[in-house]
Amino acid sequence: MAILPQTRTVVPPPVAALLPGGADGRPDTRRLPSLRHIGPNWYASVMGTAIVASAGATLPVDAPGLRAACTVVWALSAVLLLAVLTARAGHWLCHRDQARAHLLDPAVAPFYGCLSMALMAVGGATLTVGADVVGLRAALAVDVVLFVAGTAIGLVAAVVVPYLMVVRHRPAPGSASPVWLLPLVAPMVSASQGALLVPHVAAGQGREALLLACYAMFGLSLLATLVVLPLVFSRLVHHGPLPLALTPTLFLVLGPLGQSTTAVNQLADVAPGAVGASYASAFGAFAVLYGVPVMGFALLWLALATAMVVRAARNGMGFAMTWWAFTFPVGTCVTGAAGLARHTGLDALTWLAVALYVLLVVAWAAAGTRTARGVFSGALTAAPVPPRPATARTR
């Protein structure tokens, strides 16, 4: 029997150059190598920048130049969002193997919740600050698009990431991380950002449905957080401090605490136009009765996390993208404290919001400066260095 000669299909160079990998369709790690290690954690820089603008706009004080500064930061966050979206699209196009590996990595997959929060953070800042530049109508349109997209992505991530953790990831005992909270807090961001859109929905069923949907997402995120947070604290107590590079992620616990306080206060602000007077009054009382105790716990955790970061810094903690954990979670505490100040009239809460905002701006400046330096030097786009082992307990 004659053996037929083997043949192969040759793709002309112009066509091969358009394929999302090599000529055989497989990912080509030689194309845009700087994008290979741009993971979903980069959306944290967008979140951390947008919250500086929106938190500054909600402060219950009138500082000269604050609104103009917030507008500049909002514009920067919008540019960052476009840049990171483009980089992530290139990552999926040219490095699909690495993108799939990220989904199957329990340390990276939770960061997919950051995409949802980055979209909504920029959308909310556009409506609260960017409207001064682009006009209310355009700002509202942008916020609606980003809110719908961010909410849909966040709800999917809140289901898919825990599903992967159970079915595929199989994390080792005692490996619980504050990063696990990221996909769970995204619906809480939807709850607070949705409150901004409630007054723009026609009165009636639609407005009430949006308000109650926001409360449903508040409950979804809160109860899921109450499941995961004990695992995180148990890991710290039984296995000691986190690795140095991961120590800043302790600040992520502030996210659901501050964001939930923000949500109940912002939802209480818009409830009178969406539900009956009795329910609106109850929502207003709930905002204070829930927000004050949770803000107290947030301040306790802030002190604990700060002490752990100081300890890690003394042991040689260097810069990593985890520094962005100092920004968005603290920003949610700013907006939460500002909301409580509006509903209680307490000057102490006003000054707490101002103090937290100063901390936010300092943290954002530090993380932003070091990130820009790392991008230009190429250090942050290189292959990641494995984190140092967890430090021993203090004797």
Image: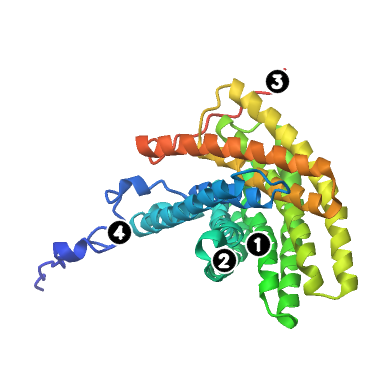
> Does 163 sit above or below residue 360?
below
288 sits to left or right of 73? right
Q: Position of residue 294 (x, y in %)?
A: 81, 48
Q: CA distance from mark 3 to mark 4?
A: 49 Å
User: Which amino acid, by three-letter code, is at mark 4?
Assistant: Arg
Residue type at mark 2? Asp
Amino acid beneath label 1:
Gln
Q: Secondary structure at mark 2?
A: helix
Q: Secondary structure at mark 4?
A: loop
Please, which residue is most extreme toward the top here?
Answer: 395
Q: Closer to us: mark 4 or mark 1?
A: 1
Q: For marks 2 and 3, give the one nearer the viewer.
A: 2
Dot 1 crowding, Cα within 10 Å, few <14, some 14–19, many 20+: many
CA distance separating discs 2 and 1: 9 Å
Name the spot of residue 31 as percent of width and height, x first.
27, 51
Camera-side residue of 47 and 111: 47
Q: Residue at x 70, y 28 (%)?
A: 307
Quadrant in the picture for residue 304 = top right
Identify the mark nearer the N-term, 2 or 1: 2
Q: Which residue is mark 4?
A: 26
Decide which of tag 1 and tag 3 comes sooner along the chain: 1
Which residue carries the number 3 mark?
A: 394
Q: CA distance from mark 2 to mark 3?
A: 48 Å
Q: Which residue is mark 1?
A: 193
Reading the image, the residue beneath label 2 is 143
**Residue at the front extreme, as displayed:** 64
Is residue 324 depicted above or below 130 in this figure? Answer: above
Q: In terms of sequence position, does the residue under pointer 2 or pointer 3 come before the other?
A: 2
